[in-house]
Image (cartoon, rainbow, N blue to C red):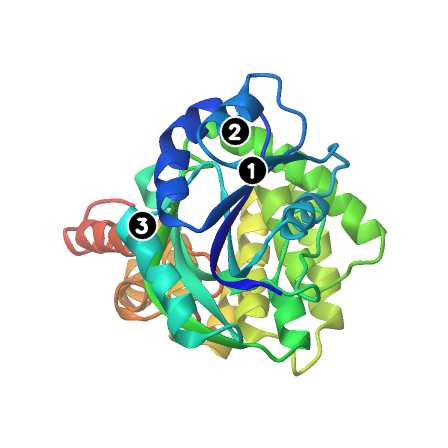
Amino acid sequence: MSTPGLTVCLIIKNERPNLQEVLPDLVLTADDVVVVDTGSSDGSVELARALGARVFTHPWNDHFADARNRGLEEVGTSHAIWLDADDRIERSDLERVRAACLDHGSGTGFTLILDSEGAKPEFRSTCRQLRVFPARPEHRFTGRVHEQIQPSLERTETRVVPLDIAVRHLGYSTDDIVRAKSRRNLELCRREWEEGAKTLATAYHYVQAASLAGEYAEGANLVREVLAATKPDSAEDIVQNLRVTLGHLEEKQGRIPRAESVYRHAVSLHARDPWAAWHLGDLLARTGRGEEAIAWLEVAVSAEPLSTRVPLPISGVRAAAENRLRALRAGTPA
């Protein structure tokens, strides 16, 4: 029988500097902190224990969900919140999360705002992510990489409530980190796809990893395969993101007419999609069609994203679109 409260769950490997920064507040605020170590050699385990966390080991097997689920086995409170060592949440906000868990009872999960810092300010992205959930045996993560808890809550028809509380993710703060993690993620996504986990979410993460790792042809071929098999009831926000990503991947391969055709198809389906509008407007500006570019760049500046589920650098897009608009209106070459 679980007790009302909140357990913080982390998985780590060689995270000593991050643990030194985040664990003291987590231990003071949450009812429990469970850390699963997947093979640290830098003293992370000893430090985590010294700071008050309960630490367990799980040999790394190229499967993030398995490591997450090992930690869930140790949770004794009504709710769990999953974090990475390079996540940051204000202590006062964690207190609010705990209070929401107590107020709503054991049948409710919560989405938080994930604010991911990029290697450059314009790459910073935001989305909503299910981070807090009832700690029940049937609620378990799935996925080798970019592991998901939401499918298990959907199966149990668990109520999910949005909280206006942010988690800052620092895991992609330099170009070198982005490249290294993208190569790792790409290998895991390939394996997962080959093993038969051919979901829309898996495809989305696979394509993003391929794009960031520079495997443009592989990513484009996968998008075409997925779009050809897409059913009418598929999540349109993810499908639209894949359409735009295909255009980007075509551009990266020097296929500008193909990219333009893809972007035009995307905006024909969602004329107020700022992500698609930015890509089309930017391409038009770079190819000397400023008047039409202005119309689409204005959409990129003013329109809202199709959803808050897909991470997009909307603030960066708007800033870039505004800069492009100023240049076009001043007659400056793109």
Q: Determine which residue is flagged by label 2.
A: 49
Circle 3 packing at 10 Å, graded few (<14), some (14-19), many (20+), is some
| Image height of 128 relative to 286, above or below | below
Residue 163 seen:
yes
Q: Residue at x 25, y 51 (%)?
A: 319
Secondary-structure class at tag 1: strand
In the displayed structure, 164 sits above or below 60; it is below
Above or below, 311 against 309 in this view is above
Q: Which amino acid does label 2 sit on?
A: Arg
Query: Circle 3 sits in a helix, a strand or a loop, which is it?
Result: helix
- Residue lying farthest bottom? 232
Q: How many marks?
A: 3
Tell me the amino acid under the disc marked 3: Gly
Q: Is residue 320 left or right of residue 201?
A: left
- Give the label, 1 or 3, closer to the camera: 1
The one of 6 and 265 positioned closer to us in this rendering: 6
Check disc 1 and give the amino acid type. Arg
Residue 303 coordinates in the image, percent (x, y): 31, 71
Can see residue 306?
A: no
Q: Whole-percent x and y of residue 161?
A: 43, 74
The dot on residue 54 is 1
Q: Which mark is residue 276?
A: none
Which residue lies most toward the left here? 330
Give me the residue at 41% from left, 69% from top. 102
